[in-house]
Image: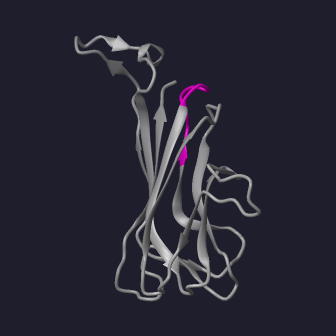
Amino acid sequence: MSTLRFNTWQNTGGTEVANSTLGTGKILQVVQGQRTTSFTTTSTSMVDVPDVSLSITPSATTSKVFVIVNGIGGGTNATHGTEFNLVRDSTAIGIGTGGSDNFSAMLLTRNADMGVGFTITYLDSPATTSATTYKLQMSTSNSDGTAVIGRYAAVDYVRAPTTITAFEVSA
């Protein structure tokens, strides 16, 4: 995990500037987590994807946290999907509403030899200055298949990392 933090800011004249005078929409810190190997599950309940998590400590309760998750994945069976949730601490965020099952993202592959790229983005308002954990969870939609992340579903020769990145944005 990488973290970029600033103790002090300086303007172009070299004078120190307080965080509160930076204005809105400025990036205050960036944190990243990454998994470079594949991960699979046959669980129909959400499970944590190891290493696709991070902890960020906002500098103000008004800060926003912009989270991006990127990866590839799929399923070993064309009759099911791979479901994803973005989670803040223990709460799923950025999920759909109104359905019987609501997720942050879902992949459907028609061919088990395929992988599908996906991105989840969410602008969160955690309203805290305590350390906050963001993570990716996944499940399979059908108990007769396997959900896969980090590689093509049924073949093991195409690999890509799965990353989660959080940006603290001044409000």
Relative to 78, 95 lies left or right: right
Above or below, 136 against 82 in this view is above
Relative to 83, 13 lies left or right: left
Relative to 132, 162 lies left or right: left
Q: What colouring does the structure picture have?
A: one colour
- Was residue 56 drawn as part of the magenta stretch in this picture? yes
**Can I make out residue 34 in this image?**
no
Farthest left residue? 13
Relative to 6, 80 lies left or right: right
User: What is the x, y in percent for residue 150?
Assistant: 44, 73
Q: Residue at x 51, y 61 (%)?
A: 52
User: Which is nearer the eye, 12 or 111?
Assistant: 111
Above or below, 60 against 96 in this view is above
Q: Residue at x 55, y 37 (%)?
A: 57
* Magenta region, main secondary structure: loop
User: Which is nearer the eye, 98 or 169?
Assistant: 98
Q: Residue at x 35, y 21 (%)?
A: 9
User: What is the x, y in percent for residue 151?
Assistant: 42, 77
User: What is the x, y in percent for residue 54?
Assistant: 53, 52
User: Which is nearer the eye, 89 or 94?
Assistant: 94
Residue 162: quarter of image: bottom left
Residue 127: quarter of image: top right
User: What is the x, y in percent for residue 114?
Assistant: 42, 81
| Magenta segment | 55-63
